[in-house]
Image (tube, rainbow, N blue to C red):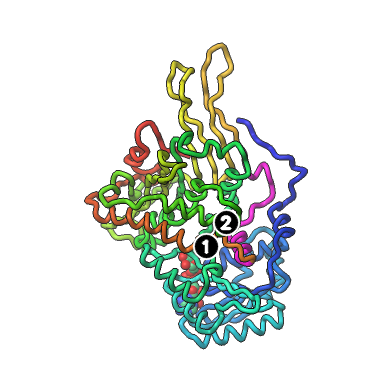
Amino acid sequence: MANITVPTASVTSNPLADELRTARTVRPCVVVIFGATGDLTKRKLVPSLMGLAKDGLLPPGFAVVGFARRAWTDESFRAELADGVRQFGRPDTSSQFDAMADAFSFHQSDFGETAGYVALKQKLEQIDRQRGTAGNRIFYLATPPSAYSSILQNLATTGLSVEKDGKFARVIVEKPFGRDIATAVALNDQVRAAFHERQVFRIDHYLGKETVQNILALRFANGIFEPLWNEKFVDHVQITVAESIGVGSRGGYFEESGIIRDMIQNHLMQVLTLVAMEPPTSLTADAVRDEKVKVLQAIRSFRPEEVDEATVRAQYTRGSFGGEEVKGYRDEEGVAAESTTETYAAVRLHVNNWRWARTPFVLRSGKRLPRRVTEVAIHFKQPPHLLFEGGKPLLPNVLLLRIQPDEGVALRFGAKVPGPDVRIRDVRMDFRYGTAFGGETADAYERLLLDSMLGDGTLFARADEVEEAWRIVDSIVAGWKQSAQRPDEYVAGTWGPERAEQLLLTGRAWRKP
Ligand SMILES: NC(=O)c1ccc[n+]([C@@H]2O[C@H](COP(=O)([O-])OP(=O)(O)OC[C@H]3O[C@@H](n4cnc5c(N)ncnc54)[C@H](OP(=O)(O)O)[C@@H]3O)[C@@H](O)[C@H]2O)c1
């Protein structure tokens, strides 16, 4: 195995932070978190803000207001957040929180009470005076989607969503962005009634991952890959997001979504667009997102009768996992005994444009698969004439983009086995992020929170992307509804149902990472 190294002299402990600090400066602002007593705030949002603080990336005028229904005080709010940072934050961020705890305050109100927003407005003005936050606001909707409507309406009614005198007002929306195209359009309409699209930041945390962003760098910062990045050379592309966990206590929630809504509509579709898009004319948010949405537009909706042939859905059954017996999906808490909700789905998509017309993209995602892994595998075509091993097809060259864990890029190719015979064996050239760059990688939420404060929407889903992805997914779900077939089954701890192999068509096989 050949390891690729980079000169360490040019590398500091957190190169991204250094680069961002010099290249982009955040203006003072207040982040208002709706749903601040919830799990997301404690586990992700505040620990990520403290990661930014540690790297010196927060502005001097900065504050957070937590908005929720519970009768918490500033003190109890801070104590809860301190606990969250200790448990879930990067090392050494606890002291960071202690040093700036007074930047965090709590605002008790129901989402539906307009008076609560009027009081919030006054509170924000007071914070502007006390902490120099300059009238800039970010509203983070860390709430169940059912709450979005009343929060958005109240922000509009009280004028909090309005940008004037050069001050910004932005909203961050958490997934799910609807559960089908109709609800996504309705949500986008609600958002647009209060905010302009440029003020809206829809979070898909996959886009905040370094290795997902590296797809763009790999493709467009190098001259060697792009000439091969098309249907003439690429046989097919496999995109995998595998989880080893089952549904756990989220059975009730999962019954309503299934893996296609929970993972494929957002994370896998986003990764697909980055792999398949044309080079953008620049890295501005709209230039990148224009190209991403074109990929989705080039994917036809399925007719119901096509869906069984182009997709596989399945449920895990009882099995053993790491030496332990685990339940089947239909025995999980909150799951109906006759449930048809899929815990695994694989989908074969065609991007109908000049670059990709004959190259299938196969996407799969599932729970209770053997490992937690996310990767993109670009499988290249065989050489036109096979000279070795009696003309037997060799294993194809694969360019593997490992998104998690063990982030990196690997290239598989054939090499001669030393000795008098001409025998070919696979070898791998491997680049590992951890080895090459060292240091800790920031959580995806850190990058996305920072970008929202900078007003950079490149790594956020635009309304049209979300709607196009739902159009495709809805056509699959409609086919499944109409199908006489029940979902297939796979034993927990295996790589999914047998039929998924057929989806790749003859001569191809799914990787088993
Ligand atoms: N948790 C995660 O890791 C995670 C990851 C990705 C995405 N998300 C998304 O992030 C969002 C929030 O998730 P979560 O897990 O943090 O939810 P959660 O733990 O259920 O928290 C919900 C929050 O909303 C508040 N709330 C609900 N109804 C309210 C009302 N009528 N008035 C005022 N406050 C109200 C709750 O406050 P009180 O309890 O004080 O009433 C609580 O602070 C969801 O959209 C979820 O899908 C979460």
Q: Ligand 1 within 8 A of label 1's CB? A: yes
Residue 232: percent from left, percent from top: 46, 34
The circle on residue 69 is none
Q: Nearer the viewer, residue 142 or 87?
A: 142
Q: Quadrant of residue 428?
A: top right
Instruction: In the rendered view, tell whether residue 320 sits above or below residue 36.
Output: above
- For disc 1, the marked residue is 203
Asked if residue 84 can be seen in this view, the reply is no
Residue located 47% across and 79% down the image: 153
Callout 1: helix, strand or loop?
strand
Q: Label 2: few (<14), some or many (≥20) within 10 Å?
A: many
Determine the main secondary structure of the stretch shown in magenta: helix
**Up-down: is 330 above or below 227?**
below
In the image shown, does 375 or 101 lie closer to the viewer? Answer: 375
The boundaries of the magenta stretch are 431-453
Residue where numbered disc 2 is placed: 208
Rendered view: 394 above or below 78: above
